[in-house]
Image: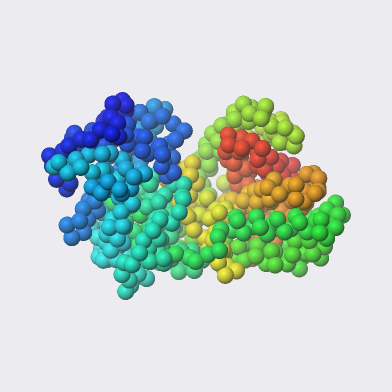
Amino acid sequence: MTELTGEITVEQTFNFDTNWEALLDNRAFVKAFLSDVLGNYMLKQRWYGGKASNIKYIELAEYFKIQQDGEVYFGLILEVNFVEAFYQHYFLPIAFVTDDNFAKKDRILPISINNQKGYIIDAVNLESFRKLVFERILTALPKDTTKVQYHKSHLLNNVVYETSRFMGLEQSNTSIVYNENYVLKFFRRIYADKNPDYEMSRFLSEKKEFKNTPPYLGSINIVDSEENNITIALMQQMIPNEGDAWEYMLKEFHKVFQNIGQKNIDINALPNTVLYQRLTVNDIPAQIIDWVGLGLFLKIQKIAKRTAEMHIALGSEFEETAFTPAHFNGDYTVWLKNRMLYQFQNRLNIIENNLDKLEGLSLELAEEFLDKKNQIRKRFLSFDWTKLKSERIRIHGDYHLGQILVHNDDFYILDFEGEPESTIRDRKVKQPALKDVAGLFRSFHYAIYGTIFNNFKAYNISQNDLFNAGELFYRYLTSLFLDTYITEIQEANLNLGYNQERIFILKYCLLEKAVYELGYELNSRPQWAVIPLKGISNIINH
């Protein structure tokens, strides 16, 4: 254990009389490496999730060799302990380089090994490391029982290494593109268990042959000293795409709002509909089709169909217990209510402390939220599992438009890691499939308001009329999605319960999602707090 003292600087060079392969057994090296130099390096990394907390010290929890034919790199599991009395684990592969011109931005520690000067760097910067990892997956044995376990899918045949590059800026992981055809994702923040992204991707791809997710091709898991199986990398087919559905919908929704002025539409004269009432395309009035455009409604139907197919695949397993559907019960209810009440109290505190940052409709809705806090709390406590006949399944867990790729008029679902704030155990809890639907509905709501905020001046329409148009659009969009989704699900005999139960669960999950979002908006961009606040108001007033 090394307290961060500020004694070591990047300019200092340590000399170690040992060879590279034995360096991690050298206590003096480990002490120098775990100093504040490493802490400072991690603070600068996009994938590091502890920026809001203060590092107390960093420990080396585990290390292992990533090697082939005498070429050796080290994989480190670092335990970052915080002053605030919690810790996180991170995966960092390291290499030693002697070229003074190399990886200037990603150097961690200058050292000298047997009087040869160089730098410890993050190994992903080295093509030789990226190539070695790819080849270890390509040559993986069907059953690997070593500490570092490489796995290859039957889909990965007759492949040789050609090229590798970084995929781009990501928040929590590092992705490498191989041969412009495969993506290997290194998980940086790691947990003492298999990553849900690995589990779900492999299950959907290998066992259910679900076509609208990137096919699983391989992985790297390690078995730690406590026999935990930890996922450090996942490889999938690269889906050629035109971007994600969030960017796609922002452009499409912009056209919808432009149409108001271009077609001289009187928003207040348009026919309304009940929130979350199932509608087919034929049920949507001609004036609404004329305003929004049939093409966009057909795209919404396609996303609904793909979402249903994902849930049908996840809910049709009867052998692998991690994926078999389960009924609601008392244990689940206790877990859910504890989570909800903790989160709700946290958001109440945040909103009370941030009221001075709000104005106009945001302030009005925030005051309504505070006035009706007991009513909202009762909503969360009203979950009575004995009245529910539907089933719980493994779900995506963090489903929104940014997790969907657009390609050739179709949609592909990715990133099954789950909700970032949740523990790894909570991410694997079987939940109502409608929780994913609620996540997407909240994403639609965000895209509508995001479009209004980003282009407000271009529309030349009052904000009030734009908000009314947005809410009307949201009703038709979600009602069409719901009908398409439920029709698909029922044809496959996945049990979502009767209509009354479905609406109860959907509203419960929407309220949960909107309350979750409220914390982020109030802390990061208070002017957007109107979006979750409006979502909460919609639910508690209908």
**In which image quadrant can residue 318 be found?**
bottom left
Q: Residue furthest front?
A: 101
Name the image quarter holding residue 363. Answer: top right
| Residue at x-position 41% and y-position 42% | 45
Percent x, y of residue 488: 61, 66
Quarter containing the C terminus:
top right
The residue depicted at 24 percent of the width and 60 percent of the height is 144
Model colouring = rainbow
**In this view of the protein, which residue sits in the foreground, 271 or 42?**
42
The spot of residue 478 in percent (x, y) is 68, 56
Residue at 71% x, 49% y: name it: 455
Q: Residue furthest bottom?
A: 158
Would residue 436 be found to the left or right of residue 374 on screen? Answer: left
Q: Is residue 302 above or below residue 518?
A: below
- Indicate the position of residue 449 as horizontal and vertical percent values: 69, 47
Q: Nearer the viewer, residue 494 or 10?
A: 10
Q: Position of residue 190 (x, y in %)?
A: 37, 45
Residue 10 visible to the viewer: yes
